[in-house]
Every structure is written in structure tokens, then in C-alpha cells.
Amino acid sequence: MGRATRPKTKRGLARRAQILRAAEEVIGTQGFSAASIAEITRVADTALGTFYIYFSSKEQVFRELVHEMGQVTRAMVAGAVADAPDRIAAERAGLAAFLRFVQARPALYRIVEEARFVDPDAHRNYFTLFGTAYAAQLRAAQDKGEITEGDAEVRAWALMGMAKALGDRYVLWDDSADIDRVVDEAHRMITRGLAP
Amino acid sequence: MGRATRPKTKRGLARRAQILRAAEEVIGTQGFSAASIAEITRVADTALGTFYIYFSSKEQVFRELVHEMGQVTRAMVAGAVADAPDRIAAERAGLAAFLRFVQARPALYRIVEEARFVDPDAHRNYFTLFGTAYAAQLRAAQDKGEITEGDAEVRAWALMGMAKALGDRYVLWDDSADIDRVVDEAHRMITRGLAP
DNA sequence: TACTTACATGAATAACTATTCATGTTTTTC
DNA sequence: GAAAAACATGAATAGTTATTCATGTAAGTA
């Protein structure tokens, strides 16, 4: 396996980014196995061998994409939630931000899901990081009396699962769905529950 | 691609089942790409070529396993929910049954998730069938006044997502987790929500 | 028993594609 | 404006594995 050092010139930096974006598109669309390096470099408008100047293997680009998804998702949700007055409002803002992110970068979203099979450690790490941060937020909200008492970790995972499923159904499958309506409906259930 | 007719003798029937179980184990453990026909037939204690007497391709066994998962999950959850006095109780019973199923057949569970990439139609079909049935149950419960009014489809998908995420975290990742406790915590959130 | 159909075998076939590398070209350095 | 370093190229390598097939053996049938 090659070395794949960091690029040291402007040109190299740009090439690497080009290839990374092409990998996101090709792997996100066709899946890890079906995606070939040849296709990735074709989309990136560069030669086959150039790939290995910047990445040591197909697995490595994949890993890097999962990592990027982690960074971007956390930043996006954190930003959306930042000026929510309380946890109840934050839940709405966070869910909406997540669904809009899936809409904006569907390929990246699929890559994280495929990581379960391609790179289990990266996958697990992604959700553990996210879940831990989420649970901490819920605990803080409990302490402030903004939400009822309960197991913050179980709740965090349940809420993450909801968001993922809604992203599958109303963003990836159905690009005409009204996201705000979905968020409203889900948020009502999250806050009030089903019991009469 | 071969013909792969149905077996016509007792022996053939048994062989086919043997290979199907081996495929569940191998594909569920190693993933679709890494799983080789050679390994599947090795686990099934039969010759390589025998696989193609019963299945026309690797994709076809996979498809059949997804289909089987659909049958079994629906039957299991329906059974568990059958004698619940109302929807609130049914939600608990259904979630518990699902988590126990993941515990019993982790390979099958992973196969359904991988279907998103290997056989998108089968994957979508699985969740559409499940989601439609789930939403119908919720609508009936609304009509009986057992739960509050709301969009049954959004709720069904949200609840399915919760169950999946809890299955990932507390069954697949952590085999020492107390499932009943997780079900209790999740159920409280489902019924009462987070709002104080 | 003789014949037909069904099933079993595993070596050979037939791609497919990740990765390397020898040979250029461009950019930076001094 | 050379020399050095960085980057670019794509044909060749090298390993993997799904699928077929010619040759058997077992089970049903008359």
C-alpha cells in the first residue's frame, strides 16, 4: 500500500479535494463495492494512478468520507441548535437541520450507513460520538427542568433512530415531501408522546 | 445465469435449506461482498457447484433472505402484539419482540440493513410493507381513542427508526444490556414524550 | 432390473478491478 | 534558469471469485 502523503502545493491540494468529492459522489451513488477507482478518477477528471498519490486505498477515502460526515453533521446540528431557547425547541431545530443536511448531501449520508459494513469501527465511532454528545445535552436539559427525567442515553439513541428513519423515508425516497410538516409531526410526538 | 428450479425430492429440499442457513450465517457475518460462495458451501458442507443447483446467483440468495426476514419479523411482532389490551401496551410488546428478534437472528437483521446497498428494491419493499401495516395499526388506535391524533405514517416511521437504533446500540453492540430496561425507558418516552 | 430424472462434484473458465510503477510533466527552490 | 521536489499518467501486474460444465452418483419409476 502506497504512502499517500499530504499534498504540498496548491495544485496538489486542489487535486486531492477534487478526487475526494468525486469519491463522495461515486461511492455514495453506487455503493462501496460497485464504485471503482477508475470511475472515481474519471469523474474527478484525472488519471487512474493519481488516486494513489493522495489516498493509500479505496478503504482510506471511504474512512475519510465517514470522518468528514461526522465533522459536518455535528457542526451543522450544533449550529442549528445553538440559539434555541430550550431543549424542546432544540429538538425541533436539530431534527430539521439533520433532514436538510441529508437533502443537501445524500451521498455522504449513505456512506455513513454503508460504513456499518465497510468500516465498522468508523461507523461505530461516528454514532458513539454523536450519541454521547446528544445524551449530555439531554442530561443538561433534565437538570434545568426543561424535560422530564429519564435515561438520557436510551433517549439519545431513540431520537437518533427517529431522525435516520425519517431521513430515509421523507428525504431519500420522497424528494417531494414537506420536511417542515414531517418535523412538526415528529416533534409533537417527541414532546407529548402518544398517550391521550 | 442457471435455472435453479425448486427441489423435487426430500434430499433436495434439505440441501437447499442447509445452503440457505449457511448463507444467512456467512453473509450476515461477513457482509455480502466478503461472503464467497465457496465459504457458504463450505459451511453448508457441500460442494461449490451445488449452490447453483438451488440458487441462480449470490444476489438471489440474498433477496430470499431479505424476504424471509420480512415474513418472520412481521409474524413475530404481530404475534407479540396480538393480545395487548390497547395500542400503548402493543407498542411495548412490539418493541420488546423486535429487540428479542434481533438478539435471536442478528445475521438476518444485518442482511436487511445491507439490502439498502445490495438490493434497494427488496430493502424498500421490506420497510414499506412494515411501515404501511404499522401506520394502519396506529390509525385504528386513533379511531378508538387509544392514542392522540397525529400523522400515522410519520409516527410509524419514527417508531421503526427508534426500534432499529435501539437494536443497534443495545443488542448488536452490547450483548449485556438489559433489554427490558431499555424497552421501559423507550416506552415511557413514546407514551409521555419529553415535555414536563 | 433397467431406465429416467434429480442431485452432487470441483476443476476450469472468464471476467473484474485494486494497486503498482516506469516514465513524463509541472511547480518550487535557490 | 537549473536542479530538486512534487505531481500526473495509464499500461501492466496480480489476485480474487462468481459462474459454468463435463462427469459422476443417488432416487424414483416401470
Image (spheres, coloured by chain):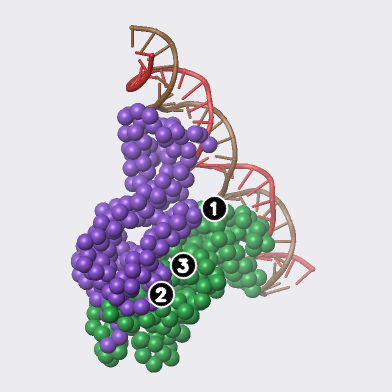
Chain colours: A purple, B green, C red, D brown
Residue A80 percent across, percent down from the top left: 24, 59
Q: Residue at x 48, y 40 (%)?
A: A57
Residue B169 badge: 3
Residue B26 percent across, percent down from the top left: 58, 60
Instruction: Report the chain holding disc 3.
Output: B
Q: Residue lying farthest front?
A: A144
Which of the two labelled residues, at mark 1 and mark 3, occupies the earlier sequence position? Answer: 1
Q: Quadrant of residue B53?
A: bottom right
Q: Is residue A143 visible?
A: yes
Q: Nearer the viewer, residue B126 or A20?
A: A20
Instruction: Report the residue marked by disc 1.
Output: B34
Q: Compared with residue A121, is residue D14 higher up or lower down, i.e. above or below?
A: above
Q: Quadrant of residue D30?
A: bottom right
- Label 1 and label 2: CA atoms lie apart by 38 Å
Crowding at dot 1, Cα within 10 Å, few <14 / some 14-19 / many 20+, comes out as some
Q: Nearer the viewer, residue D22 or B194?
A: B194
Query: Do callouts 3 and 2 mark residues in contact (Cβ within 8 Å)?
Result: no
Q: Nearer the viewer, residue A185 or B73?
A: A185
Disc 2 secondary structure class:
loop
B35 with respect to B136 (left or right): right
Instruction: Report the residue marked by disc 2.
Output: A151
- Which label lies toward us, 1 or 3? 3
- Label 3 and label 2: CA atoms lie apart by 14 Å
Instruction: Report the chain holding disc 1.
Output: B
Crowding at dot 2, Cα within 10 Å, few <14 / some 14-19 / many 20+, comes out as some
Disc 3 secondary structure class:
helix
- Which label lies toward us, 1 or 2? 2
